[in-house]
Image (spheres, rainbow, N blue to C red):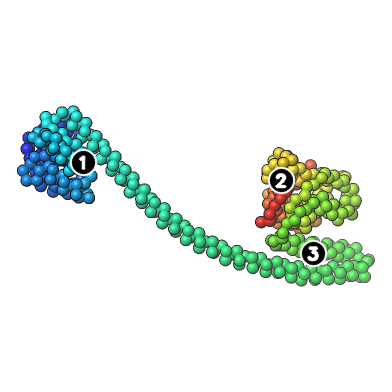
């Protein structure tokens, strides 16, 4: 809103009509004193002030406005028909006016100046509002940051405590596993010994009793294998420092352990040169033992063929292209066994899951879960590709250099 201050009412009416024709809201005061009262109550975007008035003249009113923090930035245009000399014009600017116009007034020029100052006022208000909003946002963000830092510190402390508790419980669990393994294995060994003694000494002539005893012995052997596998799975939580490992040496040790089974299955083993990687040798041995053991166990009645191949690859991805400059290796253990449907791919790496009839194929369902946990502990990947009756390929991706998690 624009305030017109003039002691002559006719001048106010004429100027007011001119401004209202341009959709400018106008208020008026007929003295300096009345103007001051209105300015203290209302926010004006511009004041058009007559210079010479009875009582407080225009110069005195503007001087008072300039000394007030709330009103000092209100733009003032002086209009004067009498005080047209330079000294009055200079005085007008010195008191704080933004413009000094002498009469007769060019109405087009006046409207242009009024609209300009209104626009400036609106922009200043927008800028002030934006500044206030920004200040509030900064304050809110600072408070949020402070609160976040406090929460992070509290959460970090809580996680450290829980981690310490977890490490303690993990240590206790490992000790418990060792004790339970020993305590459970001992009675099972005795069961196996005494059952065999009963079979050999007292049941030679009873085929049905011998069949029951053989089933009991097999059940005891499965229980012993299960305990051994569970113990192996629990050991994977222990922190062991990795070392340079020639996987060719590891593989040959595993194949040596399977000599009898390889010969009995009339199996052919094909291998190429495997890389040297940073790993825990005993755990990598376990991976090969489980994969090759499965390949032999699930081989068809025909001649078993197992291929173990490797290549250096570019990225940590199952389908990464090969590259001599790569930092990863891909190892594939392929067999021509019974295979499986890939819709069950997620199941085969879960502990105690088995896709096959345990009467036909003995096992605990832990071997592949152990292999997966070992490979992931070495910051690697493992998956499989297969079709029923067409064998299976187990694919491993390992970093050549690796720091244990």
Sooner in the amino-acid sequence: mark 3 or mark 2:
3
Residue that numbered label 1 is attached to: 75
Residue 328 visible, this angle: yes
Classify mark 1: residues with Cα within 10 Å, few (<14), some (14-19) or many (20+).
many
Tag 3–tag 2 contact (CB < 8 Å): no
Q: Nearer the viewer, residue 70 or 367?
A: 70
Q: Is residue 51 left or right of residue 372?
A: left
Q: CA distance from mark 3 to mark 2?
A: 37 Å
Numbered mark located on residue 328 in the image: 2
Q: Residue at x 72, y 62 (%)?
A: 235
Q: Residue at x 73, y 45 (%)?
A: 329
> x%, y% of residue 398?
72, 48
Q: CA distance from mark 1 to mark 2?
A: 73 Å
Q: Quadrant of the C terminus?
A: bottom right
Q: Is residue 320 left or right of residue 37?
A: right
> x%, y% of residue 60?
12, 45
- Label 2 secondary element: strand
Numbered mark located on residue 224 in the image: 3
Sooner in the amino-acid sequence: mark 3 or mark 1:
1
Q: Nearer the viewer, residue 255 or 136?
A: 136
Residue lying at the far front in this picture: please name it. 87
């Amino acid at each position: 809103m624009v305030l017109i201050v003039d002691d002559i009412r006719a001048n106010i009416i004429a100027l007011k009509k001119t401004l209202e024709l341009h959709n400018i809201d106008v208020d008026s005061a007929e003295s300096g004193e009345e103007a001051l009262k209105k300015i203290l109550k209302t926010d004006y975007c511009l004041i058009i002030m007559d210079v010479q008035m009875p009582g407080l003249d225009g110069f005195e009113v503007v001087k008072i406005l300039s000394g007030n923090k709330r009103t000092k930035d209100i733009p003032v245009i002086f209009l004067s028909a009498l005080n047209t000399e330079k000294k009055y014009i200079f005085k007008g600017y010195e008191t704080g006016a933004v413009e000094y116009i002498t009469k007769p007034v060019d109405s087009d020029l006046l409207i242009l100046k009024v609209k300009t100052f209104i626009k400036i006022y609106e922009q200043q208000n927008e800028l002030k509002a934006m500044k206030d909003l920004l200040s509030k946002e900064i304050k809110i963000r600072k408070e949020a940051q402070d609160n976040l830092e406090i929460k992070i510190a509290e959460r970090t402390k809580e996680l450290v405590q829980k981690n310490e508790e977890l490490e303690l419980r993990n240590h206790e669990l490992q000790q418990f596993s060792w004790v339970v393994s020993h305590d459970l294995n001992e009675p099972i060994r005795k069961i196996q010994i005494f059952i065999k003694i009963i079979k050999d000494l007292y049941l030679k002539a009873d085929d049905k009793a011998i069949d029951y005893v053989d089933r009991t012995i097999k059940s005891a052997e499965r229980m012993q294998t299960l305990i051994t596998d569970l113990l192996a799975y629990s050991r994977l939580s222990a922190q062991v420092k990795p070392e340079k490992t020639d996987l060719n040496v590891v593989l040959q040790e595993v194949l040596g352990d399977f000599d009898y089974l390889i010969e009995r299955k009339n199996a052919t083993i094909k291998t190429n040169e495997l890389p040297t990687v940073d790993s825990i040798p005993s755990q990598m041995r376990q991976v090969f033992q489980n994969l090759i053991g499965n390949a032999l166990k699930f081989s068809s009645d025909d001649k078993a063929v197992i291929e173990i191949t490797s290549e250096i690859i570019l990225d940590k991805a199952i389908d990464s292209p090969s590259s001599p400059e790569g930092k990863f290796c891909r190892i594939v253990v392929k067999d021509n066994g019974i295979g499986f449907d890939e819709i069950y791919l997620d199941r085969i790496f879960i502990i105690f899951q088995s896709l096959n009839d345990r009467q036909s194929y003995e096992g605990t369902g832990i071997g592949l879960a152990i292999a997966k946990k070992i490979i992931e502990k070495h910051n690697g990947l493992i998956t499989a590709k297969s079709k029923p009756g067409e064998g299976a390929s187990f694919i491993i991706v390992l970093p050549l250099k690796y720091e244990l998690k």
